[in-house]
Every structure is written in C-alpha cells, then in structure tokens.
Amino acid sequence: MRTRTRFSGGAVLAAAFVAAACSAGPKMDLDPESGRFHETARLIMTKEEAKIFSLLPDAESRREFIADFWEKRDPDQGTPENEYKKEFEARVDYANRRFKEGGPGVNTDRGRIHVFMGPPDKFEEYFNHTDTSIKGAILWWIYYDHRLGIEFVDERGTGQYKIRDYDGDFFGAMDLIKLGHHVKADDVFRKKFVKFEVSYDAGRGELEVRIPSDTLMFRENAEGDLQADLSFVVYIYADEGLSKETHRETRSVVVKDRELEALKTVDLRFGCALKPGTNFVDVIIQGRETSSSKIRRIFEIKVT
C-alpha cells in the first residue's frame, strides 16, 4: 500500500505549485467576456501568459488574446471544433459538480488536478490505513502516460482532500499541460517536455531556434537523404504597449544518414526583429506530417 507518515518537501512544493497556478492573480477591471474567460482559463495559463493578459489595455486586445490562447492549444486545426477547449470546459464543469468541499470544485486540490489532467487511469482508496496522522481516507490518482501518481489525504476526516505527496515528474507534467500538450501513448513527439531553446541575435535581428535532433521524426526523401518537415508559428508580445506580431514559416531539415548520429541539435534562424525592452516570444513547432504533433515554449527576452 502507498502511504506516507509525514509531509515531504516535494509534497509541499507540489501543493504550493497548484495553489499558485490557480490563484486569482492581480486584480483587473475586466469586461464580462474577459472576466468569464479568466475565471477558469487562469488555471492553465503559463506565468508568461498571465503577465501578458494582466497588461492588456482594453477588451479588444483581450478578445484577440483569448482567440490566440485557444488556437495555440487546438490539437487539430483541420477540424471545426477545438477539442482541447471542449475537453477543458467539460473538466471544469465536472470538477465544480463533483468536488464540493465548501466552495467551487475548481478551487479544491482534486478539482484542480482533474482540470489539469482529467480522470486518473487508476484510482486507489485506503480507509483502513496505519497512518495515525490522517483521520480520513488516503487516495492515489495514477496517470500512466505521465508516469505520475498523486496522493490526496483527508487529514481531519471532514471530506476535504489535500495533496500530500506525488510519485513521478509532477512539475514536468504541469509544464506540458499548461502549454497545451496532450500526451498520448502513440505520440513519441510529445511523451516528454521538449526543451528546445531560443536566443536572439540583436545585430542581425534574428531568432535562433535550437531543437534536440532526437525529438524530430526524419523520413527518407526522394534523394535518399533524411528529411524532417516542420511548421513554425512565432507570437511576439512587446511589453511597451503590448503590440503583437505573428510569424508563420515552414522549414525542411535535410541531413545525410551518416550525419544524423552526430547531430545533437537542429539550429534554425528566423528574421524576427524584437523591440527594445521585454519581449515574450511564444514558439510553436509542429510536424507537418502529423498535424497533432506539436511542441511549444514561451521565452522572455530582454533587448537593450
């Protein structure tokens, strides 16, 4: 049986992470549409998105942000429906109906995890345990694709469950989910958080994107070389007035078979001049052969 006799440092950090992710954040005077969006979407915003949203000056700019927010997370833009948005709204509705512990279900630990990750693949519940510090039950939610288990405890026996511990890469899973990734057993491209890097060459006005080569799916082309076809979407937000630029480009990476083993990263440059000050650069890379394969990171780049 999985039990713990005392709180671990990791558990405290996990609980703090979830609480911070779901906090109301700075007070904003929002129009009704923006307020409804922020009430729940803040649960899955990255810290960069939360900052951008808090600085938007009017309802029109927030409306554009909202449209982009869901589009970036749409797993298949070839269909009329945004499957991610539909699933998110269903999870919020379920959490609010199911986890009633004295307030909105999305503000409970179990409700927040359900919104992030959906129902567990395996559920373990222990009423007759030997942990005398816990008066109620101990629960474990297990997610196989994420290789993650999360422990909830009803410490006082009142039916209010709090995260106490976890087994696996809790923070890696949260990073994936907040950026809009769906981890599936048959999707090698997204089984882990792909930490590609982006830097800025101010002299040339170019962004350099460095992608670990072992995360790319190469195929043999007509010439017998190995080729990976990629689509890039780059959103650039400048904090001075929060102007937004969007750059879209496709690239093909071609290497010889004998070169691939020694190739550590694929380095690509894009002409994207950044403005002086702080820029948020949101980069989405998608495999052109499989529309559902997508990786994403947001970078804060300061230009003097």
Image (cartoon, helix red, strand yellow):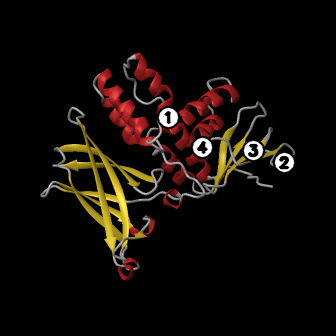
Query: Which image quadrant is residue 62 in?
Result: top left
| Residue that mark 3 sits on | 139
* Disc with the residue nearer the chain's start (3 vs 4): 4
The residue furthest bottom is 258
* Disc with the residue nearer the chain's start (3 vs 1): 1
Q: Residue at x 43, y 53 (%)?
A: 295
In this rendering, would 112 be left or right of 21?
right
Element type at marker 4?
Answer: helix
Element type at marker 1?
Answer: loop
- The label nearer to you, 4 versus 2, is 4
Q: Residue at x 42, y 68 (%)?
A: 218
- The label nearer to you, 3 versus 2, is 3
Say which amino acid is labelled 2: His
| Residue that mark 2 sits on | 129
Alpha carbons under labels 1 and 2: distance apart = 46 Å
**289 or 109, which lies in front?**
289
Q: Residue at x 87, y 45 (%)?
A: 128
**286 or 47, which lies in front?**
286
| Residue that mark 4 sits on | 117
| Residue that mark 1 sits on | 81
Alpha carbons under labels 4 and 1: distance apart = 20 Å
Say which amino acid is labelled 4: Met
